[in-house]
Amino acid sequence: MKKRRFLAVIARCLVCCLLLASAGCSSPAASDPKLTDVAPDAALSDVALAETAGDTASADTLATCQATPGCACNGHPALCDRRLDEVVFPSAHNAMSNADEGWLFANHNYGLTRQLNDGVRGFLLDTHSWENPEDKSTTAWLCHSSCQLGSIRLVDALTKFTTFLDAHPDEVLIFIVQDDLPTAEFVAAMTTSGLLPYAMTQPKGAKFPTLRALIASGKRLLVTTEQTGGPPAWIHRFNDLGFDTPYTFKTMAALRTAEGPEDSCRKYRGTAGAPLFLMNHWVAQVLPAAKWSEQANVRTVLVDRAKRCAKLHGRLPTLVAVDHYDLGDLFGAVRELNGL
């Protein structure tokens, strides 16, 4: 108990110092979340602060910082001075597919706006050319497998992200796009939606900027695609910048497999050692099901697998992608992995 109170006092003092700092709300350089940092235990999350007896002031102070432009990056001051590839992003697989908007066999309960407001910061999206059922024209959509099962016009979906970024100046997002659409049509939708000015360009071979630097530049969206990449330069081919795990897990046992050729953490696609690392973390026998997400998204399951993958690859995942992000505790797991 004494140790817990001591840590709470230290955390409160650090947050107060951040708030008293000048406009940039400068924070000390964050530790490098590599293999040696996969199990941080000295930092307290905002939830832990709120739950600590007599420590509601700390939670209030963090909330004040989160509402102060330039103070918190993706919700936390401690993330500001970490490079983008040193932060773990809570992510949604097939993010556009959701039950609220009538999609059949949906991957999520809620749509993109709710996902953004709830804290999802990485988005796996599928683009398609599809004949508009209203006027028979062929236009750009977000769909999964078949647009008959659910769809949203690409420009309308991207506008939701523009609206969010306009209203939240301290947030950084990542897209991984399955690009079954001509690049020119994707660029046109980015332009029409107003999202294009937020797209960053990552020079080949360069280190990623910190979240603070991205926020200062206004370039707060990393766009990657599965197939083509650019040009233009702001469209990056994911497999050049990153790698991922397998994703076809039909049982929880398969998701937990920790050795041999079926190790669930093994590299599946992309460039080994590249800065971005996507941990695909969902179970689907044929179609997504909430009962599997409830098991896969348990905080300890997520954290244990992420740490195991970190031991194999020497770094934590950049994106932890799940189905039914609202079931289980994706956000708690990501806070823990980020050492918050």
Image (cartoon, helix red, strand yellow):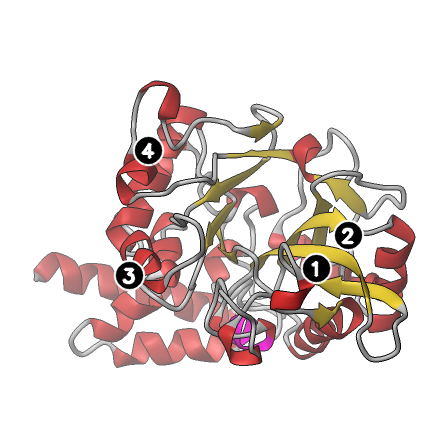
Q: Is mark 1 in CB contact (under 8 Å) with mark 2?
A: yes
Q: Is residue 291 left or right of residue 140?
A: left
Q: Nearer the viewer, mark 4 or mark 2?
A: 4
Q: Give the range drawn in magenta.
A: 113-117
| Residue at figure coordinates x 43%, y 78% from the top left | 63
Q: Nearer the viewer, mark 1 or mark 4?
A: 4
Check disc 2 and report the residue beneath it.
200
Q: Is mark 4 in CB contact (under 8 Å) with mark 2?
A: no
| Residue at figure coordinates x 27%, y 48% from the top left | 301
Q: Distance between the residues labelled 4 and 2?
A: 31 Å
| Residue lying furthest top | 260
Indicate which disc residue 308 carries: 4
Q: Is residue 105 left or right of residue 162?
A: left
* Position in image of residue 176 (x %, y %): 65, 49
Q: Is mark 3 in CB contact (under 8 Å) with mark 2?
A: no
**As shown in the figure, which amino acid type bears the numbered disc 2?**
Met
Tell me which numbered mark, 3 or 4, is placed earlier along the sequence: 3
Residue 293, image quadrant: bottom left
Tell me which numbered mark, 3 or 1, is placed earlier along the sequence: 3
Check disc 1 and report the residue beneath it.
220
Indicate which disc residue 169 carries: none
The answer to whether any part of residue 51 appears in the image is yes
Residue 170 lies, with reference to residue 339, above or below; the image says below
Secondary element under disc 3, as helix, strand or loop, is helix
